[in-house]
Amino acid sequence: MQRLSARSFAALATIGTLVLTGCGTESGDPEVAASASTGRTIRAQKFMQLTQVHSETGMTLLEGPTFGKDGGLFVVDVTAPEGRPKVMRVDVGKKTSRGVHTDGRGAYTSAQFSPYDGRLYLSDFAHGEVVSLAPGGGDKRTFFSGEVDGARMNPDDIAFDQEGNLYVSDSHGLSEGEAHGRVVRISRDGTKATVLAQDLAAPNGVSFDADHRGLWFSELTENRISYLRLDAKGEVTSRHTAIRVDGGIAQTDSIAVDADGNLYQGLHGRAAMAVYDRYGERLATVELPARTEGLESATNVAITPGGTKAYMTVSGPAGGYLYRFDALAEGIRQSNGG
């Protein structure tokens, strides 16, 4: 999730305290240029605008793009007020969107469809909950709420394993500027929560690798990506720092992974994504067209399952947009936001 600096969620009193550090159509193929230090540059093209800045909250922030089985692209707006769509479904063929869910409480920062029950799961950063919706957006249920090892979560991004267990990046401690963050696994029935990693600096992006052998996660305030190797039962066998992101003023946001195992690391503070291979080599940087103004971050991306069309959520004072580019490999479950 993009971080809204201590540019406060005071304006979002109805949503809760979410203190963060931290979203027309152009035709033609994405432009690719050479860059010696960061691999090639891939130019994403504006696909469509989804939201404008909300007068009630003073911002808009798109996150969690994920494709449903019906081919629709689902996107959340973290700062949408009550009565405005908090979850939208985009028809990428027709370039149309419609709201499928709103409520008066949630600040939803990610979205994923479960491989177990097919429902759409949302993380509520402000209230420490994970909720689920029917694929069409109704039938809201609370999947998990309460404390984990004595502390309530600030669930940011989510990922599922093949059995339907949920893995959460918990940014607990962010508002105090302390490294109390965690990676938490929640059983697929929502009854058991297990801490897999702790003492983390505002963990944000989380995604399985292409083979479901391990879990990538990023830490916003350290600009690093780590790797948790897991056994067949989902227990951690090792952990190490895998990639250090040279972002300048930008910070690491969400992560997606394609069929070749490449990582797409969203950046807050720069409307761009850094692309790495599984060994940490910087392959490319996804950039917006030159002279684009009013967009401050690229939070996440969804790659068409079985295809290479990638849709990136970008937000800022100019509003919330989808930008499109050609990914380096085909989309898989791990290529769907989160």
Image (cartoon, rainbow, N blue to C red):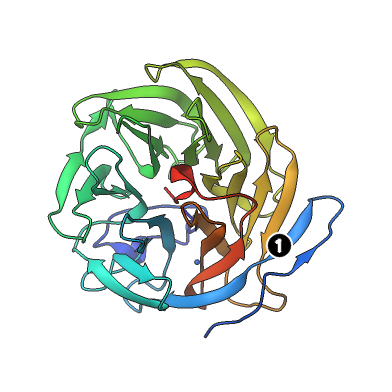
Tell me, yes or no, if residue 133 can be seen here: yes
Total of numbered circles in the picture?
1
The answer to whether residue 172 is seen in the rendering is no
Please say if 329 is above or below 146. below
Indicate the position of residue 265 as horizontal and vertical percent values.
Answer: 59, 48
Expressed as whole percent of the image width and height from the top left, the position of residue 291 reads 71, 79
Seen at 58% across and 31% down, the residue is 226
Question: Which residue in the protein does label 1 denote?
Answer: 42
View extreme (bottom): residue: 24
User: What is the residue that sits farthest to the front in this orientation?
Assistant: 306
Tell which residue pokes out farthest to the left in this image.
Answer: 139
The disc labelled 1 sits on which kind of residue? Ile
Question: Can you say whether 227 is above or below 11 in the image?
Answer: above
- Relative image position of residue 328 (x, y in whole percent): 65, 52
Residue 141 sits above or below residue 280 on the image: below
Most foreground residue, 10 or 135: 135
Depth order, front residue of 270/228: 228
Image quarter of residue 29: bottom right
Give the answer, above or below, for where 188 lies relative to 31.
above
Q: Position of residue 219 (x, y in %)?
A: 55, 39
Q: Residue at x 38, y 42 (%)?
A: 158
Q: Which residue is drawn at 36% across and 32% down?
A: 162
Q: Which residue lies furthest to the top in this view?
A: 237
Classify residue 232 as left or right of residue 331: left
Query: Could you tell me which secondary element the residue under label 1 belongs to?
Result: strand
Label 1: how many residues lie within 10 Å, few (<14), some (14-19) or many (20+)? Answer: many
